Image (cartoon, helix red, strand yellow):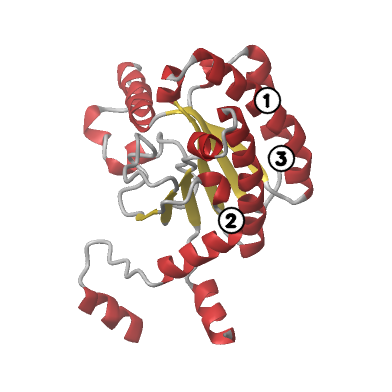
Amino acid sequence: MAHATAAVNNRLPRHIVIIMDGNGRWAKNRRLPRIAGHKAGVNALREIVKFSAKKGIEALTVYAFSSENWNRPGSEVSRLMKLFMKALQQEVDELNRNNIRLRFIGDHTAFSEKLQTSIREAEEITCHNSGLQFVIAANYGGRWDITNAFRVLTGKIKAGEISPSEINETLIQSYISLADLPEPDLFIRTGGEMRISNYLLWQLAYTELYFTDQLWPDFTPEDLEMTLVWFMGRERRFGRTSEQIKREKRA
């Protein structure tokens, strides 16, 4: 058992990203209002964050609210915004005590001024923490992310700061969200759907994709541990052959 644990530690993903799907169905199965599922989802997330920090994961990014979620019924969106605000206020001090840095990505201009202020304050409170980088994608979309990067680059070209010939993958990457963090190693989606739903489109180029039928409120640290074991069994070649990987390990 000790040998297996050591192997897990040696091959832990540096950056995990999650689509937390299934809150509404979890509530429906229990004949509860959908917001009850979202509240249960917050509780599940709290435990996953704690577990990730203890495991020494460098970064955890979760999809809290996509740019497409505005299409949901207005009453549900309103309740989600209130829950988002309440969770921020309740959790930020605990995150700070545990040396976890809280960050947000996405277009936050659509949120109320009060929520935008809470987001900024939460980031400021935890900005000097050196532990787990906990990132919440809120009003985020992968296409928005890439479009925004090109909008910035176009502005720099017009200003004469860069020329079109200087644009390459590395330069574009520097203007994409999470550019300062390790690229995602492990993607997890709960709820049984098998798609990435406009999430981190640029960043997921070489990420291992893991899908589970479990609804998010039922996803526990033990389930994440099992997912990490699955990840350990993956051979990550990044375009190389298995033989090349084996030779590198022997060298």
| Residue occupying the point 53% across, 60% down | 224
The quarter of the image holding the C terminus is bottom left
Residue sitting at the far front: 31
Q: Position of residue 182 (x, y in %)?
A: 46, 52
Residue 141 left/right relative to 36: left
- In the picture, the disc for residue 220 is 2
- The nearer-to-camera label among 2 and 1 is 2
Q: Of helix, strand and loop, which one carries label 1?
A: helix
> Residue under circle 3?
126
For label 1, the crowd category at 10 Å Cα-Cα, with few meaning under 14, some 14 to 19 and many 20 or more, is some
Residue 42 left/right relative to 186: right
Please tell me whether residue 195 is drawn above or below residue 9 in the rendered image.
Answer: above
Q: Position of residue 244 (x, y in %)?
A: 23, 76
Amino acid found under the numbered disc labelled 2: Thr
| Residue occupying the point 42% across, 67% down | 230
Amino acid found under the numbered disc labelled 1: Met
> Residue under circle 1?
85
Q: Quadrant of residue 78?
A: top right
In the rendered structure, are the residues bearing label 2 and label 1 in contact, judged by CB atoms less than 8 Å apart? no
Marks 3 and 1, how far apart at CA: 17 Å
Amino acid found under the numbered disc labelled 3: Thr
